Image (spheres, rainbow, N blue to C red):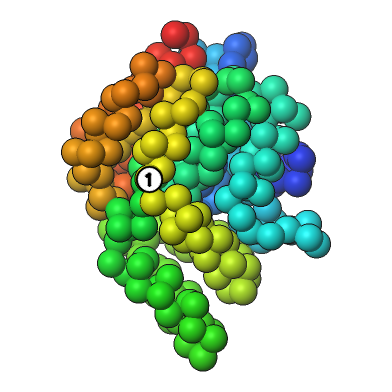
Amino acid sequence: MNKERKSAGWLVVDKIPPSPKFKVLLIPGLMGSDFVFSKLMNNSALEEAGVHLIGGNPPGFKGNLLPDDFDFHISSYAASVEAIAEAETVNLILGHSFGANVLIEVAFRRKFKGKLMLISPSLCRDAETKDMKMLDKYSRNKLLKGLMWSVTYASIKSAFTPYFKDPDDLASVVRDAKLIPKKIAAEIFLGYFDYLIRHPDLDERLITTTVPVYYLRGDKDDIGFTQKNRETLKKSSLVKLFEVPNASHFAMNDNPEEVARLIIEMLNS
């Protein structure tokens, strides 16, 4: 197990190659942790390419403490990403799902000058799954919120089962998810959906980027992506779209070799 350390309010783990040339920060999705990147962090091609991987757990994730005044806005998470990216002098930031949505805001804010890789963000509320939209709806009901999150925590294992076939991997993902207090998980979740509601055209927001962006989706991804999304993203010469073969929503877990190849390609471009 890699040793954890604190950096800029994050809980991180490192995979440092013998001859490091690049630094890449990895940001998980909702209820995730650095563990969801374990296959990527053990990829030999990245090690040979000199890629120092930093598996990040943002404030509130994996039991990591939150600042007293933290408001759970996506813009606040974007500012936190910018802070750790500066502290760690990273060349590329990779975000998955929620983490990828945070990177849309990082791109929009134009403070980070490195490269961005997004794995399956949601570009609007409708892109999310039926279960996630239902959880959003009932989490806004004061009488039902507590019940909904108790049910959610009771079903975490079944939620991750389609994506993690190995029993030990599944147990690790579930363990880390349950380190997040239910109240904090609910606030992170609602802050995320508030962002999707506030910005229903995140494809338009992303193409304002001034830094290179690789946008990845698994070919079996269950997050919606429309022809309009595709056409909008192609308007920017800085945004490149990739479909990861034989991959679900967790493309970096299903096909780490292809994601690693794209990381190396992007770092060297």
Q: Quadrant of residue 264?
A: top left
Q: Position of residue 105 (x, y in %)?
A: 54, 40
Left or right: residue 152 compared with residue 54: left
| Residue sitting at x 62%, y 74% | 183
Q: Residue furthest top?
A: 269
Q: Is residue 216 visible?
A: yes
Q: Position of residue 206 (x, y in %)?
A: 44, 34
In which quadrant is the N terminus drawn? Answer: top right
Nearest the eye: 228 or 54: 228
Left or right: residue 135 compared with residue 81: left
Image height of 114 relative to 27, above or below = above
Nearest the eye: 147 or 126: 126
Q: Position of residue 30 (x, y in %)?
A: 49, 56
Q: Which residue is label 1 attached to?
A: 201
Q: Residue furthest bottom?
A: 143
Q: Is residue 247 visible?
A: no
Image height of 229 relative to 129, above or below = above
| Residue sitting at x 50%, y 61% | 194
